Image (cartoon, helix red, strand yellow):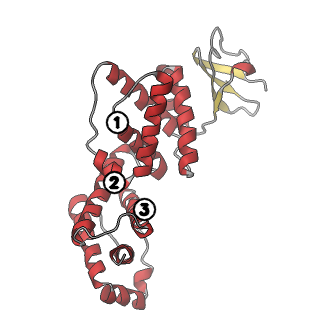
């Protein structure tokens, strides 16, 4: 594999062109040391290759690699691999950038005794426990590999990056999304006077539905009305599931009032069906 360097980013990172003329980013200890434009890459030094076709994303990655210590990038790459395997769903390729940048900034703040509390920790704990567990795993690896013991709130911030990469949202949306889900859970719990069993599969499915409902709403992806066109389903839910349909409308009104997002009739019906399952456990 013969590749020519087109840019040396730093001692540990270079940009190269492969045999097909595609731009790649290569990382490895000392891979760029003493190198210049047109030199060949030493294959033995290659530890990681990033093939990113999006030019904006590639530019952001190059900027991160130039500013963030190599050991942080290497650890983040290992963390992203672990996270991806653990949740078994595609992740946005920008996670390596956002997470390495966050880790570097968190460590810098920690060294200056500038710790930030995460106001969404309770919501993340309730709504995204898997992502929070992964965030705590990352904190353990940061302590073991870099010798920096960050506060638990940082696990929540890392979880938000994972949620963002998993659901295709941005960080601002993640905050509103998490807040909205938690509020919907609290409204549901209040409606049923705290009598919901949150250990059931039905409740887990309800929570998953709320997550993807929130994602659709914040990405303006409207669910087409299919169920509501079936008069039998519509009357069944509205009449026989009247209590649960009423709860669904409470959720709809709250979302409209606080987030200016409108639920379709199908969303109301689907929510009512989920609520019936958890309310009858």
Q: Which residue is mark 1?
A: 152
Of discs 3 and 2, which sits in the foreground? 2
Please name which of the two marks, 1 or 3, marks the residue nearer to the observer: 1
Q: Which residue is mark 3?
A: 208
Q: Earlier in the sequence, mark 3 or mark 2?
A: 2
Q: Residue at x 57, y 51 (%)?
A: 88
Quarter of the image with the N terminus is top right
Query: Considering only order in the chain, which callout, 3 or 1, is on the residue closer to the N terminus?
Result: 1
Q: Position of residue 159 (x, y in %)?
A: 41, 43
Q: Element type at marker 3?
A: helix
* Mark 3, other Cα within 10 Å: few <14 / some 14–19 / many ≥20: some
Tell me the tag on residue 126.
Answer: 2
Percent position (x, y) of residue 252?
A: 27, 69
Which label's residue is closer to the chain start, 2 or 1?
Answer: 2
Image location (x, y in percent) of residue 255: 26, 63
Q: Quadrant of residue 49?
A: top right
In x, y percent, where is residue 262?
30, 67
């Amino acid at each position: 594999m013969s590749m020519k360097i087109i840019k040396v980013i730093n001692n540990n990172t270079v940009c190269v062109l492969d045999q097909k003329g595609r731009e790649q980013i290569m990382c490895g200890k000392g891979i760029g040391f003493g190198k210049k434009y047109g030199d060949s890459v030493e294959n033995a030094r290659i530890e990681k290759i990033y093939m990113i076709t999006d030019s904006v994303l590639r530019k952001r990655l190059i900027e991160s690699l130039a500013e963030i210590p190599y050991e942080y990038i290497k650890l983040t790459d290992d963390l992203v691999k672990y996270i991806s395997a653990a949740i078994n769903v595609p992740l946005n390729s920008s996670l390596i950038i956002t997470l390495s940048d966050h880790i570097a900034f968190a460590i810098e703040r920690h060294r200056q005794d500038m710790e930030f509390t995460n106001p969404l920790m309770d919501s993340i704990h309730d709504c995204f426990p898997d992502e929070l567990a992964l965030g705590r795993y990352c904190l353990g690896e940061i302590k073991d590999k870099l010798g920096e013991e960050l506060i638990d709130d940082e696990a929540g911030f890392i979880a938000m990056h994972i949620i963002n990469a998993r659901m295709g949202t941005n960080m601002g949306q993640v905050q509103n999304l998490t807040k909205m889900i938690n509020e919907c859970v609290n409204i549901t719990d209040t409606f049923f006077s705290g009598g919901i069993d949150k250990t059931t599969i039905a409740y887990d499915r309800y929570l998953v539905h709320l997550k993807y409902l929130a994602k659709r709403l914040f990405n303006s992806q409207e669910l087409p009305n299919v169920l509501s066109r079936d008069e039998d389903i519509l009357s069944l839910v509205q009449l026989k599931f009247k209590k649960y349909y009423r709860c669904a409308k409470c959720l709809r009104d709250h979302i409209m009032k606080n987030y200016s997002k409108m639920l379709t009739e199908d969303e109301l019906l689907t929510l009512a069906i989920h609520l019936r399952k958890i309310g009858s456990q």
